[in-house]
Amino acid sequence: MNYEDELIKIIRNDLFLMTILKTVELLDLPDCWICAGVLRNKLWDVLHGIHTSANDIDVIYFQENDVTIETEKRFEAQLHRLLPDLPWSVKNQARMHLKNHLQPFSSSFDGISHFPETATAIGARLINNHIEIIAPYGLTDLFELKIEPTPKYLKTEKLHPIYQQRVATKKWKTIWTNLILNN
């Protein structure tokens, strides 16, 4: 099975995700993607035959010339005007390295590669009705229901506890019972 093609098919057949992608595309932000839980959870829902609601919709972009939180909040407000009552979260990856005291990221792909879990390190965007996927560690863990730390969180002593804490507090296995967790 080609996991990328399968994920694109799942996204394309989901009215909610397609609406999100079309709305985010309207912002016309550089290197802009929806990512993380909204995609991961949708696929886990499909693989478990259940439906959960999005607890947040992560939108990332990369713009070095304006790294203010106020700008991110302005984009969030635009999304709230376009699609109210959704849990939007917009983050410029050009400043997110500061959160964990890392070297600056070079792109949204680089930012996603610094996410804690391989199954979360995914993004999708819509450009002229074409869905693109980025997944620095591939899609195998996501489709095989494996929760693994990304290499950066596995190798870095100060980051690995963050991964372990997320696994403990997110309680994913209580919702998606077939998940395979690696601490």
Image (cartoon, helix red, strand yellow):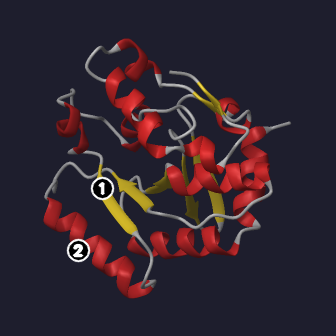
Q: Which mark is residue 143?
A: none
How busy is the neighbourhood of tag 2: few (under 14 within 10 Å), some, or many (20 plus)?
Answer: few
Q: Quadrant of residue 141?
A: top right
How busy is the neighbourhood of tag 1: few (under 14 within 10 Å), some, or many (20 plus)?
Answer: many
Mark 2 to mark 1 CA distance (whole Å):
11 Å
Q: Residue at x 42, y 17 (%)?
A: 154
Q: How many numbered marks appear?
A: 2
Q: Quadrant of residue 16?
A: bottom right
Can residue 8 be seen by looking at this rendering?
Answer: yes
Q: Residue at x 73, y 33 (%)?
A: 144
Q: Quadrant of residue 146?
A: top right
Please state the horizontal and vertical placement of residue 19, each as a whole percent of the image: 59, 76
Residue lying furthest front in this view?
Answer: 174
Please state the horizontal and vertical placement of residue 162, each as a whole percent of the image: 33, 30
Can you say whether 56 is above or below 171 in the image?
below
Q: Which residue is mark 1?
A: 91
Left or right: where 158 falls relative to 171: left
Q: Residue at x 26, y 52 (%)?
A: 63
Q: Residue at x 52, y 44 (%)?
A: 171
Q: Which residue is mark 2?
A: 74
Quadrant of the snapshot with the N terminus = top right
Q: Amino acid at mark 1?
A: Lys
Please state the horizontal and vertical placement of residue 118, each as a whole percent of the image: 54, 31
